[in-house]
Amino acid sequence: MNKVKYQILKSAFFILFLIVGLSSCNHDKTKPGYAYMPDMYYSLAYNANSENPVFKNKMTNQMPVPGTIARGHMPYPYQAKNYLDQIAAGNELMNPVEINLQTLAEGKVQFDIYCMSCHGELGDGNGYLYTSKLYPMKPTSLIESYVQSKKDGEIFHVITVGSLSGLMGAHASQINAEDRWKIINYIRNDLAKK
C-alpha cells in the first residue's frame, strides 16, 4: 500500500512540475518573464558623450593612459609633409617582408586595388584617373629613377602619410603596414622589370 501511495505521490509531483513548467513557457515576446541575474541583462552602460559619476572629470569617454598602444596599431613617429622626416624614415625603416613569389603576388593584388587607378597598370603614371581627365596632374611614375632610387622606408613614408606636394594622400588608414611593404616589394622587383 505504501508503495502505491508513493507512486501516486511521485506521479502527482511530476505532473505538477510539468504543468508549472509548461505554463511558464509564454510565446508573448513583450513579456519575457523573469531574468536570472537581471544586472547582467540590463547593465548600466553609458554613452560615450554622457556624464559618468565614476570618474573625477565626469566624462565617460576617457583618454588612454600615456604610453599605451592600441592593439594592432603600430606607432608612426614621422610627421607628414616634412622632408627631414621623410629622409629619416628612409634611413631608419627597413622592409621586414621577405621577397618571394607569394609576397610579390600579394603586393600586386594590393597595388591593383590601391595604386593602379592613379599610377597605372605599368606604374608609369598613366592610370585611369589621369587618362580620363579626372585627375589634373600626371601622378609620379613608379618605374622611373626618381622613385626607384629612393629607399624602401622613404616610399613607405609617402604611402603612409602622403607626398610632400600633397598630390598623393595618406593611405595608412586603408592599407595596413605589412601590405604597404608588399606593395614596395612589388614595385621594386616586378613592376620595375616590366
Image: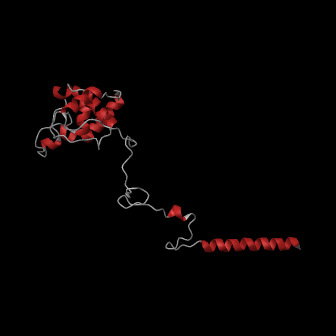
Left or right: residue 125 compared with residue 100? left
Q: Position of residue 27 (x, y in %)?
A: 54, 72
Q: Quadrant of residue 106?
A: top left
Q: Residue furthest front?
A: 56
Q: Residue at x 36, y 31 (%)?
A: 102
Q: Position of residue 81 (x, y in %)?
A: 19, 38
Left or right: residue 175 compared with residue 139? right
Q: Is residue 145 visible?
A: yes
Q: Residue at x 59, y 71 (%)?
A: 25
Answer above or below: position of 19 versus 39.
below
Q: Nearer the viewer, residue 121 or 85?
A: 85
Q: Quadrant of residue 104?
A: top left
Q: Quadrant of residue 146?
A: top left
Q: Residue at x 37, y 52 (%)?
A: 62
Q: Position of residue 154 (x, y in %)?
A: 24, 30
Question: Quadrant location of the C terminus?
Answer: top left
Count of numbered circles on the image = 0
Q: Is residue 194 visible?
A: no
Question: Quadrant location of the N terminus?
Answer: bottom right
Q: Nearer the viewer, residue 107 or 145?
A: 145
Answer above or below: position of 185 versus 3.
above
Q: Nearer the viewer, residue 126 or 156?
A: 156
